[in-house]
Image (spheres, coloured by chain):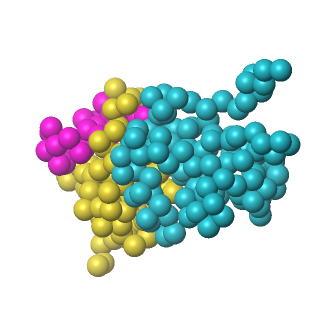
Chain colours: A cyan, B yellow
Amino acid sequence: MTTTVQRPEHPEVSDIELTEVLFALSDPSRLAIVQLLASGASGELMTCQSVGGDLAKSTRSHHLKTLREAGVIRSTPQGRERLISLRRDDLDARFPGLLDAVLTDGHS
Amino acid sequence: MTTTVQRPEHPEVSDIELTEVLFALSDPSRLAIVQLLASGASGELMTCQSVGGDLAKSTRSHHLKTLREAGVIRSTPQGRERLISLRRDDLDARFPGLLDAVLTDGHS
Protein backbone atom coordinates (compact mmCIF):
# COMPACT_ATOMS: atom_id res chain seq x y z
CA MET A 1 0.00 0.00 0.00
CA THR A 2 1.69 3.15 -1.14
CA THR A 3 0.45 6.11 0.81
CA THR A 4 2.58 8.88 -0.58
CA VAL A 5 -0.28 10.24 -2.65
CA GLN A 6 -2.14 11.24 0.46
CA ARG A 7 0.76 13.10 1.98
CA PRO A 8 0.46 16.84 2.23
CA GLU A 9 2.41 18.91 -0.20
CA HIS A 10 5.74 20.23 0.99
CA PRO A 11 7.80 22.39 -1.34
CA GLU A 12 11.41 21.42 -1.93
CA VAL A 13 13.91 23.71 -0.24
CA SER A 14 14.85 25.29 -3.55
CA ASP A 15 11.20 26.01 -4.28
CA ILE A 16 10.50 27.86 -1.06
CA GLU A 17 9.62 31.43 -1.99
CA LEU A 18 10.60 34.33 0.24
CA THR A 19 7.36 36.24 -0.27
CA GLU A 20 5.30 33.16 0.61
CA VAL A 21 7.30 32.61 3.79
CA LEU A 22 6.91 36.27 4.76
CA PHE A 23 3.18 36.08 4.10
CA ALA A 24 2.86 32.88 6.11
CA LEU A 25 4.62 34.56 9.04
CA SER A 26 2.66 37.80 8.76
CA ASP A 27 -0.39 36.52 10.62
CA PRO A 28 -0.22 36.73 14.43
CA SER A 29 -1.77 33.29 14.90
CA ARG A 30 0.60 31.66 12.43
CA LEU A 31 3.58 33.49 13.92
CA ALA A 32 2.55 32.24 17.36
CA ILE A 33 2.44 28.66 16.02
CA VAL A 34 5.95 29.05 14.60
CA GLN A 35 7.21 30.55 17.86
CA LEU A 36 5.72 27.64 19.77
CA LEU A 37 7.33 25.10 17.45
CA ALA A 38 10.66 26.94 17.69
CA SER A 39 10.56 27.17 21.46
CA GLY A 40 11.02 23.45 21.76
CA ALA A 41 8.97 23.49 24.94
CA SER A 42 7.14 20.40 23.81
CA GLY A 43 9.82 18.92 21.67
CA GLU A 44 10.22 19.40 17.96
CA LEU A 45 7.17 17.47 16.92
CA MET A 46 3.72 18.56 18.02
CA THR A 47 0.27 17.37 17.18
CA CYS A 48 -2.07 19.65 15.28
CA GLN A 49 -4.20 19.88 18.38
CA SER A 50 -1.37 21.10 20.57
CA VAL A 51 -0.40 23.72 18.02
CA GLY A 52 -2.79 26.60 18.00
CA GLY A 53 -5.05 24.83 20.43
CA ASP A 54 -7.09 27.91 21.16
CA LEU A 55 -8.12 28.32 17.54
CA ALA A 56 -11.20 26.86 15.92
CA LYS A 57 -10.33 23.63 14.14
CA SER A 58 -11.05 25.02 10.68
CA THR A 59 -9.01 28.15 11.40
CA ARG A 60 -6.12 26.08 12.71
CA SER A 61 -6.24 23.82 9.67
CA HIS A 62 -6.17 26.82 7.38
CA HIS A 63 -3.18 28.33 9.16
CA LEU A 64 -1.28 25.03 9.18
CA LYS A 65 -1.97 24.59 5.46
CA THR A 66 -0.65 28.09 4.73
CA LEU A 67 2.50 27.42 6.77
CA ARG A 68 2.99 24.00 5.18
CA GLU A 69 2.53 25.12 1.60
CA ALA A 70 4.90 28.04 2.15
CA GLY A 71 7.56 25.59 3.36
CA VAL A 72 7.61 26.80 6.95
CA ILE A 73 6.40 23.62 8.63
CA ARG A 74 6.34 19.93 7.87
CA SER A 75 3.33 17.76 8.56
CA THR A 76 4.10 14.11 9.06
CA PRO A 77 1.43 11.43 9.33
CA GLN A 78 1.78 9.22 12.37
CA GLY A 79 -0.98 6.77 12.93
CA ARG A 80 -4.23 8.67 12.90
CA GLU A 81 -2.55 11.94 13.74
CA ARG A 82 -0.29 14.39 12.04
CA LEU A 83 2.84 15.66 13.69
CA ILE A 84 3.94 19.20 12.95
CA SER A 85 7.52 20.41 12.92
CA LEU A 86 9.29 23.60 11.96
CA ARG A 87 11.47 23.32 8.84
CA ARG A 88 14.17 25.32 10.58
CA ASP A 89 17.14 23.80 8.76
CA ASP A 90 15.48 24.23 5.39
CA LEU A 91 14.55 27.84 6.12
CA ASP A 92 17.99 28.63 7.52
CA ALA A 93 19.59 27.19 4.42
CA ARG A 94 17.30 29.05 2.06
CA PHE A 95 17.08 32.39 3.89
CA PRO A 96 19.95 32.68 6.36
CA GLY A 97 19.09 34.76 9.38
CA LEU A 98 15.45 35.25 8.53
CA LEU A 99 13.93 32.89 11.06
CA ASP A 100 16.29 34.04 13.79
CA ALA A 101 15.33 37.65 13.16
CA VAL A 102 11.63 36.85 13.19
CA LEU A 103 11.78 34.66 16.28
CA THR A 104 13.92 37.11 18.24
CA ASP A 105 11.41 39.87 17.82
CA GLY A 106 8.23 37.97 17.39
CA HIS A 107 6.91 38.78 20.82
CA SER A 108 6.48 42.46 20.14
CA MET B 1 6.07 68.83 17.02
CA THR B 2 3.25 70.96 15.72
CA THR B 3 3.21 70.15 12.01
CA THR B 4 2.48 66.46 12.14
CA VAL B 5 -1.19 66.74 11.26
CA GLN B 6 -0.77 67.05 7.52
CA ARG B 7 2.08 64.60 7.24
CA PRO B 8 1.44 61.06 6.17
CA GLU B 9 1.19 58.63 8.97
CA HIS B 10 4.41 57.01 10.00
CA PRO B 11 4.44 54.74 13.02
CA GLU B 12 6.99 55.46 15.71
CA VAL B 13 9.81 52.92 15.84
CA SER B 14 8.39 51.35 18.98
CA ASP B 15 5.00 50.98 17.31
CA ILE B 16 6.26 49.12 14.25
CA GLU B 17 4.70 45.66 14.34
CA LEU B 18 6.59 42.62 13.07
CA THR B 19 3.57 41.03 11.44
CA GLU B 20 2.74 44.24 9.59
CA VAL B 21 6.31 44.54 8.32
CA LEU B 22 6.29 40.90 7.20
CA PHE B 23 2.97 41.41 5.43
CA ALA B 24 4.23 44.58 3.75
CA LEU B 25 7.27 42.67 2.46
CA SER B 26 5.27 39.61 1.38
CA ASP B 27 4.13 41.11 -1.92
CA PRO B 28 6.58 40.77 -4.83
CA SER B 29 5.94 44.33 -6.04
CA ARG B 30 6.43 45.81 -2.60
CA LEU B 31 9.51 43.69 -2.00
CA ALA B 32 10.93 44.95 -5.31
CA ILE B 33 10.33 48.55 -4.21
CA VAL B 34 12.18 47.91 -0.95
CA GLN B 35 15.03 46.20 -2.80
CA LEU B 36 15.28 49.19 -5.13
CA LEU B 37 15.35 51.64 -2.23
CA ALA B 38 17.95 49.51 -0.44
CA SER B 39 20.16 49.19 -3.49
CA GLY B 40 21.03 52.85 -3.29
CA ALA B 41 21.38 52.91 -7.07
CA SER B 42 19.46 56.15 -7.23
CA GLY B 43 20.37 57.47 -3.83
CA GLU B 44 18.40 57.03 -0.67
CA LEU B 45 15.53 59.26 -1.65
CA MET B 46 13.41 58.45 -4.66
CA THR B 47 10.27 59.97 -6.07
CA CYS B 48 7.09 57.95 -6.07
CA GLN B 49 7.28 57.82 -9.85
CA SER B 50 10.75 56.31 -9.89
CA VAL B 51 9.74 53.67 -7.36
CA GLY B 52 7.59 51.01 -8.88
CA GLY B 53 7.47 52.89 -12.12
CA ASP B 54 6.05 49.98 -14.08
CA LEU B 55 2.99 49.75 -11.86
CA ALA B 56 -0.31 51.51 -12.42
CA LYS B 57 -0.44 54.70 -10.39
CA SER B 58 -3.23 53.47 -8.13
CA THR B 59 -1.47 50.16 -7.55
CA ARG B 60 1.79 51.94 -6.75
CA SER B 61 0.02 54.29 -4.35
CA HIS B 62 -1.59 51.36 -2.58
CA HIS B 63 1.73 49.55 -2.21
CA LEU B 64 3.51 52.67 -0.96
CA LYS B 65 0.74 53.27 1.57
CA THR B 66 1.03 49.70 2.85
CA LEU B 67 4.80 50.04 3.18
CA ARG B 68 4.51 53.44 4.85
CA GLU B 69 1.86 52.44 7.36
CA ALA B 70 3.82 49.34 8.29
CA GLY B 71 6.85 51.51 9.04
CA VAL B 72 8.99 50.19 6.19
CA ILE B 73 9.32 53.43 4.22
CA ARG B 74 9.12 57.13 4.91
CA SER B 75 7.34 59.52 2.60
CA THR B 76 8.59 63.08 2.82
CA PRO B 77 6.88 65.98 1.05
CA GLN B 78 9.23 68.07 -1.07
CA GLY B 79 7.58 70.76 -3.13
CA ARG B 80 4.87 69.11 -5.15
CA GLU B 81 6.41 65.70 -4.89
CA ARG B 82 6.94 63.12 -2.23
CA LEU B 83 10.29 61.53 -1.67
CA ILE B 84 10.40 57.93 -0.53
CA SER B 85 13.10 56.42 1.62
CA LEU B 86 13.65 53.11 3.36
CA ARG B 87 13.49 53.29 7.18
CA ARG B 88 16.49 51.05 7.40
CA ASP B 89 17.85 52.34 10.71
CA ASP B 90 14.43 52.13 12.34
CA LEU B 91 13.84 48.60 11.07
CA ASP B 92 17.34 47.48 12.04
CA ALA B 93 16.81 48.87 15.53
CA ARG B 94 13.41 47.25 15.92
CA PHE B 95 14.09 43.90 14.23
CA PRO B 96 17.83 43.31 14.04
CA GLY B 97 18.83 41.24 11.05
CA LEU B 98 15.39 41.08 9.48
CA LEU B 99 15.95 43.49 6.63
CA ASP B 100 19.38 42.07 5.88
CA ALA B 101 17.93 38.57 5.67
CA VAL B 102 15.12 39.69 3.42
CA LEU B 103 17.33 41.76 1.13
CA THR B 104 19.98 39.08 0.82
CA ASP B 105 17.52 36.56 -0.45
CA GLY B 106 14.92 38.72 -2.03
CA HIS B 107 15.94 37.88 -5.55
CA SER B 108 14.87 34.28 -5.32
Magenta span includes B43: yes
The residue located at (33%, 52%) in the rendering is B99
The residue located at (30%, 67%) in the rendering is B93
Number of numbered discs visible in the structure rendering: 0
Residue B67 position in % (x across, y down): 40, 50
Instruction: Give the image quarter of residue B52.
Output: top left
Residue B12 vs residue A91, the one in the foreground: A91
Examine the rendered structure and indicate whether residue A17 appears above or below residue B94: above
Residue A102 vs residue B1, the one in the foreground: A102
Examine the rendered structure and indicate whether residue B68 appears above or below residue A19: below
Magenta span includes A56: no
Range covered by the magenta-colored residues: B26-53
Residue B22 position in % (x across, y down): 47, 51
Which quarter shows the C terminus of chain B?
top left
Residue A79 position in % (x across, y down): 83, 42
Determine if residue B6 is in view. Answer: no
Left or right of B30 on screen, residue A85: right
Residue extending furthest front?
A: A1
Instruction: Give the image quarter of residue A36.
Output: bottom right
Instruction: Give the image quarter of residue A5.
Output: top right
Residue A1 vs residue B96, the one in the foreground: A1
Which quarter shows the N terminus of chain B?
bottom left
The residue located at (41%, 29%) in the rendering is B56
Left or right of A49 on screen, residue B38: left
Determine if residue A99 is in view. Answer: yes
Left or right of A54 on screen, residue B93: left
